[in-house]
Amino acid sequence: MNWPSLTDHEVLAARGPKAATDPWKPVTSFIEPERQADGRVLDVVTLFLANRECLFRCVYCDLWKHTLDEPTPRKAVPAQIDAAFDQLPKDQLAAASVIKLYNSGNFFDASAIPPSDWPAIADRVRRFDRIIVENHPLLIDDRAVRFRDLVGKPLEIAMGLETVYPDVLSRLNKRMTLDDFAKAASFLTWQDIALRAFVLLRPPFLTEQEGIEWAIKSVEFAFDVGVNCCSIIPTRSGNGAMDQWQADGWFHEPRLRSLEEVTEKCLAFRRGRVFADVWDADRFSQCQICTAARTERLRAMNLTQTVPQSVVCSCVG
């Protein structure tokens, strides 16, 4: 394939400015319902922590916009957790039993989350029944086990699989192979640590139909190697590098109807939970008539893990 690729330097050069980010406050925090593996729908606390930017310069990523250029100061992450807990509705916070500590990168990167802060972090999240963090497959090792044991509660790690199309994956500058992902998944399964995967819908170089087919194949691969649930994320422009490829004709954002189709077909596997990312969903629809109904249908799929009646509209989605 005569497809382009971008180096770290080129990815950085295509960027705009970062947002002002306070290391002592979380980027954002909220509580939302999520279907659990046992079928219950529970409130989940999600914190987006401010910390050192990810070590990897993935072409499609826009999470760098709210990260620090320098290593995260010691004691800053526990302070962010305290600040988030102070801001969230007290009754909802008390009822929540799961927490996500998402940090726009890798929880086990010492420059992002100082290991010296682990005990203070563990003290703050130990009351939850499950703790979820995110991490790159190449940084999966005994650190995950040590943190799990420190917290003393079930740990789940979210990793970006993105796509199983090798020629596409190799051009996303993720610096990971499918074997790397499978090895990380095997290690986590062996250590009784749950795993969720992020899958991109229509990454660069693919047509709409190819985007659908390869997202479904990616979810199948994830379940094959031990993933417990998959989040399907429509690939977006807006980070600089993706805008460049979009202008050159190498990338097009997917349609909302394609997200529906992938979610429907992956739910039919009945091999684990499948979630559709509905943030900013209206940007992927060309029809003002059915966008709201399609988005609500996707939310219903997320919570019930079943496929509701289709939305009837004369548009193409």
Image: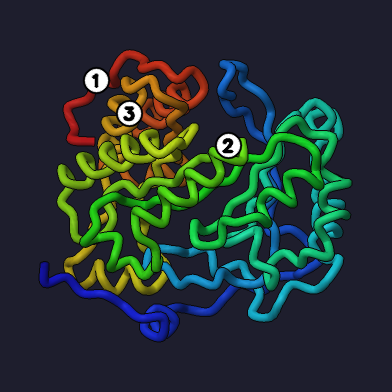
Looking at the rendered image, the quarter that the N terminus falls into is: bottom left
**Where residue 204 appears, x then y in whole percent?**
25, 60
Q: Examine the rendered structure and indicate whether residue 85 appears above or below residue 252.
A: above
User: Is tag 2's residue or tag 1's residue first in the polypeptide sequence?
Assistant: 2
Label 3 vs label 2: CA separation?
Answer: 19 Å
Q: Secondary structure at mark 1?
A: loop
Which residue is most to the front? 190
Q: Viewer-proximal residue, 144 or 134?
A: 144
Q: Is residue 2 left or right of residue 161?
A: left
Of the residues tagged 3 and 2, which is closer to the observer? 2
**Where residue 245 appears, x then y in whole percent?**
25, 70
Which residue is labeled 3 in the image?
A: 266
Give the residue displayed 80% in from the left and 73% down from the top.
73
**Where residue 118 appears, x then y in whole percent?**
81, 57
Mark 1 and mark 2 in contact (Cβ < 8 Å)?
no
Q: Is residue 301 left or right of residue 31?
A: left
Which residue is labeled 2 in the image?
A: 194
**Where residue 236 appears, x then y in whole percent?**
37, 56
Label 2 vs label 1: CA separation?
Answer: 37 Å
